[in-house]
């Protein structure tokens, strides 16, 4: 009997972790790599949103990205396009994951976080 209960618990845990990539904090959005984002540059299916402060953004950002600082994301939802896959970017991936989590709670957005942020970006930047 105990073995059956243990198996059921393991199956449930497996499916819960599989659903969100093993990190329940990421529910509602997916992490993507800097390499993935590099392939999205210039692709009209994606909207790249840098959530760093303007001074950080002006120091160098992913080509084609727009700057909407983290503290203003929810008040700027009208600038986020529901018909595109929205990729949030920051310095390390922390602020962008917060932005992704906030926007994922809103209806109709496909949300992604660039894991590692600009620290993981090894490509040319736009200034």
Image (cartoon, rainbow, N blue to C red):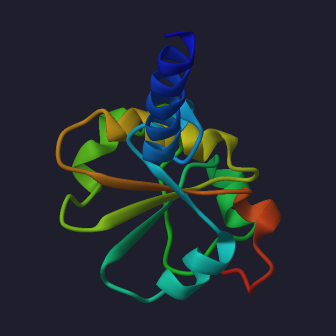
Is residue 35 found left or right of 124 in the rendered image? left
Name the residue at 54% across, 29% down. Answer: 10
Q: Is residue 107 above or below residue 6?
A: below
Q: Position of residue 20 (x, y in %)?
A: 47, 43
Q: Nearer the viewer, residue 30 or 1?
A: 1
Is residue 83 found left or right of 17 in the rendered image? left
Q: Position of residue 70 (x, y in %)?
A: 53, 39
Q: Nearer the viewer, residue 54 or 88?
A: 88
Is residue 95 found left or right of 45 in the rendered image? right
- The residue most toward the front is 1
Name the residue at 37% across, 74% down. Answer: 46
Is residue 36 found left or right of 84 in the rendered image? right
Q: Position of residue 127 (x, y in %)?
A: 68, 77
Which quadrant of the view contains residue 23?
top right
Q: Count numbered badges in the picture.
A: 0
Name the residue at 60% across, 83% down. Answer: 38
Q: Position of residue 2 (x, y in %)?
A: 55, 10
Q: Nearer the viewer, residue 106 or 76?
A: 106
């Amino acid at each position: 009997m105990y073995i059956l209960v243990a198996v059921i618990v393991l199956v449930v845990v497996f499916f819960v972790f599989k659903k969100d990539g093993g990190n329940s904090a990421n529910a509602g959005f997916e992490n993507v790599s800097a390499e993935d984002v590099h392939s999205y540059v210039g692709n009209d299916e994606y909207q790249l949103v840098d959530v760093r402060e303007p001074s950080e953004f002006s120091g160098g950002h992913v080509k084609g990205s727009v700057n909407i600082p983290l503290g203003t994301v929810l008040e700027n939802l009208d600038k986020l396009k529901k018909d595109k896959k929205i990729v949030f970017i920051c310095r390390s991936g922390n602020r962008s994951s917060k932005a992704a989590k906030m926007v994922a709670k809103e209806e109709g957005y496909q949300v992604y976080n660039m894991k590692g942020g600009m620290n993981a970006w090894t490509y040319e930047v736009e200034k």
